[in-house]
Image: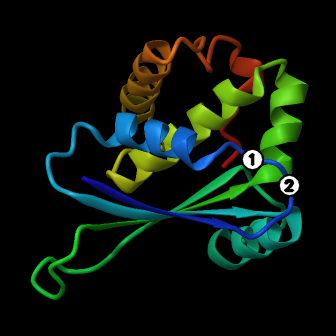
Amino acid sequence: MLELDIQRATDATAPDDTAFRQWCELALRQRSADSELTIRLVDEAEGRELNHTYRHKDYATNVLSFPADVPDDLLDIPLLGDLVICVPVVEREAAEQGKSLEAHWAHLVIHGCLHLLGYDHIEDEEAEEMEGLERELLAELGHPDPYADDETDSITH
C-alpha cells in the first residue's frame, strides 16, 4: 500500500492527486513493502533555495529526491522519503523540449521515485539501468521515450 502526501506550496497548476498516485504506484510496484512518501510542489524561489542548500547549485531544478535515511531498527515505518518538484521548471522544460506536459510530469515523478528506491544515474551502467526502467514504465502509460533526443535530456540534475 502507498501512503502519499501531496503538498501544494504553489498556486501553479499541477496534475491531480490521482495522477501522482498512479505514477508513484507504477514506479514503486517492484517494492513489496508498504511505502510512504511526500511530494511537495514548489515555485522557483523554493526550488532554487532547496537546490542551493542541499546540492550547492544556485538554480531551481525540476525534481529533488530526498530518500529517508532512517535505520530499520529505529522506526518501524515504511518511509521512503520526499520528492520536491518545481512546477514552473517542469512546465518550461516540457515546452522547450516539445514534450507533452503529462508525459514530462509522469517521467519526473517516476524518476524521483526510482531515486528513492536507490537507483542512480551517476555511473553509465547505473544510468542505463535507470533510464531503461523509466522508458519501460512510461511506455506502459503510452508515453514516448523521454531520452529519444539526448540533447534535450529532461533530467537536469
Toward which corner of the image does residue 9 lie, by quadrant? bottom right
- Please tell me which residue lies in front, 139 or 130: 139
- SS at mark 1? loop
Q: Identify the image's colour scheme: rainbow, by chain, secondary structure or one colour.
A: rainbow
* Residue 90 in the image: above or below residue 5: above
User: Tag 1: Cα neighbours inside 10 Å, few (<14), some, or many (≥20)?
Assistant: some
Image marks 1 and 2: residues in contact by CB distance under 8 Å = yes
- Residue at position x 69%, y 79% in the image: 53
* Residue 84 in the image: above or below residue 128: below
- Residue at position x 60%, y 11% in the image: 144
Please state which amino acid type lies under the numbered disc 1.
Ala
Does residue 120 appear anywhere in the picture? no
Please state which amino acid type lies under the numbered disc 2.
Ala
Mark number displayed over residue 73: none
Relative image position of residue 114 (x, y in whole percent): 40, 44
Relative image position of residue 59 (x, y in whole percent): 84, 61
Relative image position of residue 14 (x, y in whole percent): 74, 47
Question: Label 2: which residue?
Answer: 12
- SS at mark 2? loop
Toward which corner of the image does residue 106 lie, by quadrant? top right
On the picture, is 84 further left or further right than 59? left
- Please tell me which residue lies in front, 60 or 42: 42
Report how far apart the C-alphas of labels 1 and 2 lie in the structure: 6 Å
Tally of numbered discs: 2
User: Tag 2: Cα neighbours inside 10 Å, few (<14), some, or many (≥20)?
Assistant: few
On the picture, is 40 further left or further right than 60? left
Does residue 103 appear anywhere in the picture? yes
Question: Label 1: which residue?
Answer: 14
- Residue lying at the far bottom of the rendered structure: 74
